[in-house]
Image (cartoon, helix red, strand yellow):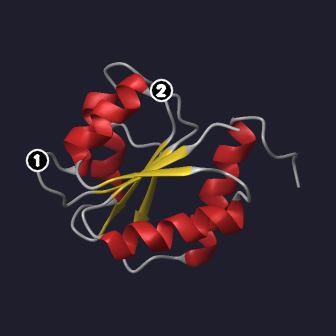
């Protein structure tokens, strides 16, 4: 099973998302980065199942990171944000969008959808 990668400058948020991935996709390894530039670098050289990224981060925001990732990859990307809307996230290339405050069921549903896309979950 390929790992997922989570990008957020807040360690507590990364931990929260990591726990959600553990619930929705048990056994999946999760890598973490604290900014958009680090995310782009990791995705460029790594083999990840999917990306979950915040928007407001140092060095490069989530929208910019998604746009850069789309230049070389079609990996599923979920943008989490309380500062931009779904339309803007999708224009940048995000596969999915989660607004803040988070909708737990929607979040878990997105992770499970990515599992299916990667052949790790049978249709329910």
- The answer to whether residue 43 of the structure is visible from this angle is yes
Question: Residue 31 vs residue 53: left or right?
Answer: right
Please identify the quarter of the rendering in which residue 3 is found: top right
* Numbered mark located on residue 59 in the image: 1
Between 101 and 14, the one lying in front of the other is: 14
**Residue 66 appearing in the image:** no
Q: Nearer the viewer, residue 66 or 25?
A: 25
- Numbered-mark total: 2
Label 2 sits on residue: 74
Residues packed near mark 1 inside 10 Å, few (<14), some (14 to 19) or many (20 plus): few
Residue occupying image coordinates x 25% and y 41%? 38
Q: Residues within 10 Å of mark 2 (few under 14, many from 20)?
A: few
In the displayed structure, does residue 11 sit left or right of residue 104?
A: left
Q: Quadrant of the C terminus?
A: bottom right
- Give the mark nearer the N terminus: 2 vs 1: 1
Disc nearest the viewer among 2 and 1 = 1
The image position of residue 47, as x and y in percent, is 52, 28
Taking the spot 77% from the left edge, 35% from the top edge, the residue there is 119
How far from the left and from the top, in percent, is residue 8? 30, 60
In the image, is residue 122 above or below residue 9? above
The residue under the point 47% across, 26% down is 74
Provide the secondary structure element on which disc 2 rests: loop
Element under disc 1: loop
């Amino acid at each position: 099973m390929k790992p997922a990668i989570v990008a957020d400058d807040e360690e507590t948020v990364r931990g929260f998302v990591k726990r959600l991935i553990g619930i929705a996709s048990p056994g999946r390894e999760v890598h973490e980065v604290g900014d958009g530039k680090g995310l782009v670098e990791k995705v460029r050289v790594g083999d990840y199942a999917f990306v979950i990224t915040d928007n407001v981060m140092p060095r490069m925001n989530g929208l910019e990171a998604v746009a850069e990732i789309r230049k070389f990859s079609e990996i599923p990307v979920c943008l989490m944000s309380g500062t931009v809307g779904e339309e803007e996230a999708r224009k940048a290339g995000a596969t999915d969008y989660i607004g803040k405050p988070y909708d737990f069921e929607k979040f878990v549903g997105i992770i499970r959808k990515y599992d299916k896309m990667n052949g790790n979950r049978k249709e329910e």
